[in-house]
Amino acid sequence: MCDLVREQEGHRAQPSACIIDSQSVKTSIDVPTAGQGTDAGKKIVGRKRHIVTDTLRLLPAVPVTAASAPDGTAGTQLLTGVAATYPTISKTWADTAYRTKAIDHAANPGIDLETIRRDPTTKGFVPLPRRWVVERTFDRLMLHRRLARDYETLPTRSEAMIHVAMIDLTSRRLTGEATVTWRGT
């Protein structure tokens, strides 16, 4: 389905670049503590969604781990899977959490991983080049109320729920239907 969206929007069927990022989400009380962790930077107990999006906000891969999992380790696994599935990808952008392990690992399949740093002199919110694409993907996923918190007992079920949300978003793009909004209801 992603190939259809890419071709409909005038691009090649296979992506040549992607963006990597992660999102920490709280879990419900039904989730076993063995599948959770603490993201020390954000002070969130829960799980972490690591996603790879192409430049059109389509989602080739999404593993879900404990929130305590380091981004660099998950990034290496993510890049291995994406390089095997999409050998056309030659460029990747990521935040600075992926700067060590993932850069070295990305060079093996021939992917140039570039980290995008936030300017320390700026205050407030400033959209970063290329990174806004993955942040917008997280925003679109959060429109699906089931993804506002992780309710699933198994991480693979969480991944499936994210894929279901992306199927909905992708089919809306194919048909030209507007994205659902919960405002004014």
Image (cartoon, helix red, strand yellow):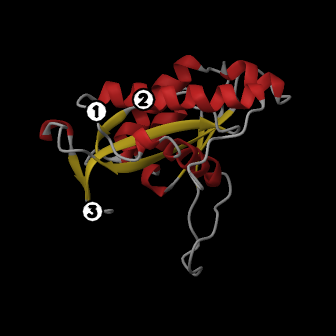
Q: Where is mark 2, residue-wise?
A: 161
Looking at the picture, which amino acid does disc 3 mark?
Lys
Q: In this view, does 44 lie above or below 181?
A: below
Which dot, 1 or 3, sits closer to the camera?
1
Alpha carbon of mark 1 to alpha carbon of mark 3: how far? 21 Å
Answer with mark 2 or mark 3, whichever residue precedes in sequence.
3
Asked whether residue 67 appears in the rendered view, the answer is no
Looking at the picture, which amino acid does disc 1 mark?
Glu
Q: In the rendered view of the protein, which quadrant contains the N terminus?
A: top right
Q: How crowded is mark 3: few (under 14 residues within 10 Å), some or many (20 or more)?
A: few
Tell me the number on the disc at residue 71: none
Alpha carbon of mark 2 to alpha carbon of mark 1: how far? 9 Å
Which dot, 2 or 3, sits closer to the camera?
2
Q: How crowded is mark 1: few (under 14 residues within 10 Å), some or many (20 or more)?
A: some
Answer with mark 2 or mark 1, whichever residue precedes in sequence.
1
Which residue is depicted at the point 69% across and 39% down?
55
Q: Which residue lies furthest to the right in this view?
A: 10
| Residue 5 coordinates in the image, percent (x, y) | 74, 25
* Disc 2 + disc 1, Cβ < 8 Å: yes
Alpha carbon of mark 2 to alpha carbon of mark 3: how far? 24 Å
Tell me the number on the disc at residue 152: 1
Which residue is depicted at the point 42% across and 29% down?
161
Which residue is depicted at the point 41% across and 25% down?
160
User: To which quarter of the image does residue 117 belong?
Assistant: bottom right
| Residue 6 coordinates in the image, percent (x, y) | 76, 26
Q: Left or right: 80 with respect to 113?
A: left
Pick the residue in front: 179 or 102. 179
Pick the residue in front: 161 or 112. 161
